[in-house]
Amino acid sequence: MTGASNLYPTADLRARDAAHHFHPFTDTGALNREGVRVITSAEGVWLTDSDGNRYLDGMAGLWCCQVGHGRGEIVDAVEKQMRELDYYNTFFKTSHPPVIALSERLAQLSPPQFNRVFFTSSGSEANDTVFRMVRTYWDLMGKPEKKTIIGRWNGYHGSTLAGTSLGGMTGMHAQGDLPVPGVHHIPQPYWFGEGGEMSPDEFGLWAARELERAIDVLGEGKVAAFIAEPIQGAGGVIIPPDSYWPEVARICRDRDILLVADEVICGFGRLGSWFGSQHYGIEPDLMPIAKGLSSGYLPIGGVMIADRVAEAFIDKGGEFYHGYTYSGHPACCAAALANLDIMVRERLVERVADDIGPYLQQRWKALGDHPLVGEARMVGLVGALELVPAKGDRSRKFAPVGEVGTLCRDISFGNGLVMRAVRDSMIISPPLVLTHEEADELVARAARTLDETYAALKKDGRL
Ligand code: PMP
């Protein structure tokens, strides 16, 4: 941490934020009493706050900043685009060069079954698009009874009505009386938390076959699709056992159910492949994307549509009554194109697979030896530490759930490292440009954070 530079008057910023800003996913009352942290600038993997403190951005913003902060090349591309064509829509038989170039680029970068993309401004909008597209697809196929979409408990697909409904966050469902009808949830493949006495592979098969059991109960003729993240992100970086995805893919194939891989976090190199489904060898029919598509520089998302689905719409004709004012926004497309150029030129995906990924994984997994850590897991550059009260006993958790995670997260900020807490696990998902030295620094700060959390828990008798 560097000393306060006082470039910005923090107290003033905090007061104005508290007076007028209603924050997402926040207890705004509690935040206003505590005072918000104001981030004022960023460069590479480093953030600076209004007091001049520096933090290693272990979350790449919100799992999105693949190429790191402050890339002038993206800024220049956006400026150039905005001077040429600031905005125009893609409705009414019109298009523009950046949306054409980005569509083509995504078709080239994605697995062979994908040749078309529908644009949105966010991952949530992408999943609202999925919801309507899946049901309309089965209407077009003459199977209008196939309407139910199966998701997973503790899955995350956004916070709009369809996103919240497809996701399996019970706290979110409670606000707004969701899910909407026609969504069913099955258990997640969370071996550490829910695997009981089963081996990881036994549990992975069990969790996959919950899909088949649900299809049997609901009726194959009623089920439209299964949606899941290759690795659950917001649910706590839940890495499924190796047995899970092949079995899910088999079930979707055998039972004529569309497979939707939500690639909003896992896409664009996070797992060391362009898309998370490639890491697991599955071939989805739809892939919602966002975040790493533009590294978060401007808001853009979309749905990659496999030929099987796209051709049903195209061949059978008829308008798809769906779209957003900002579908394919020229400036956002320009940002995405510049971001993808950097990713390809700097071989960031390969780097995650062969270099920085294995390097950080080895050091991160060594944190699993800490007395507070029940499991340290990581694939590509996304990982978690499970904080536990009794090492070696997966059945014991801290109570109430979440307090220790929050304490650890606050200590981590104090140590100049952004980690996110989900329940009592600590999550990281750093930019893909992380250097070896920065990886060492990240792990050193995480280790210090674990020591300090452990000491604080010992001191107040919680351990
Ligand atoms: N799907 C997944 C897997 C996500 O992680 C997120 C966001 N964290 C979303 C969808 C929603 O994206 P957005 O916040 O851009 O609406």
Image (tube, rainbow, N blue to C red):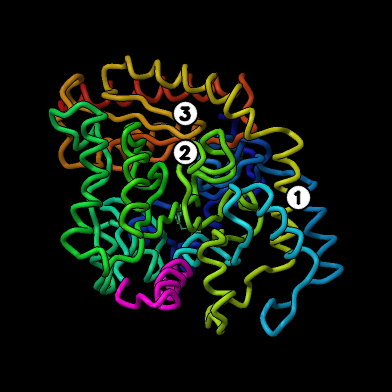
Mark 2, secondary structure of its residue: loop
Q: Position of residue 432 (x, y in %)?
A: 61, 34
Q: Is residue 350 above or below residue 64?
A: above
Left or right: where 414 falls relative to 121? left
Q: Is residue 227 above or below residue 2?
A: below
* Relative depth, front residue between 154 and 134: 134
Closer to the chain start, of discs 1 and 2, is 2
Left or right: where 120 falls relative to 383? right
Residue type, numbered disc 1: Ala
The residue singled out by tag 2 in the image is 281
Q: How many marks?
A: 3
The residue singled out by tag 3 in the image is 415
Q: Is residue 291 above or below residue 447?
A: below
The residue singled out by tag 1 in the image is 338
Residue at x 60% of width, y 49% of height: 112
Q: Quadrant of residue 370?
A: top left
Marks 1 and 2, Cα distance to the nearest angstrom?
28 Å
Marks 3 and 2, Cα distance to the nearest angstrom?
38 Å
Question: Alpha-carbon neighbours of circle 3 within 10 Å: few (<14), some, or many (≥20)?
Answer: some
Marks 1 and 3, Cα distance to the nearest angstrom?
33 Å
Question: Alpha-carbon neighbours of circle 2 within 10 Å: few (<14), some, or many (≥20)?
Answer: few
Disc on res. 220: none
Q: Is residue 190 visible?
A: yes
The C terminus appears in which quarter of the rendering? top left
Residue at x 82% of width, y 71% of height: 85
Q: What segment carries the magenta color?
A: 128-146
* Relative depth, front residue between 452 and 83: 83
Could you tell me if the residues under marks 1 and 2 are in contact, i.e. CB atoms within 8 Å?
no
Residue 184 within the segment the image draws in magenta:
no
Residue type, numbered disc 2: Gly
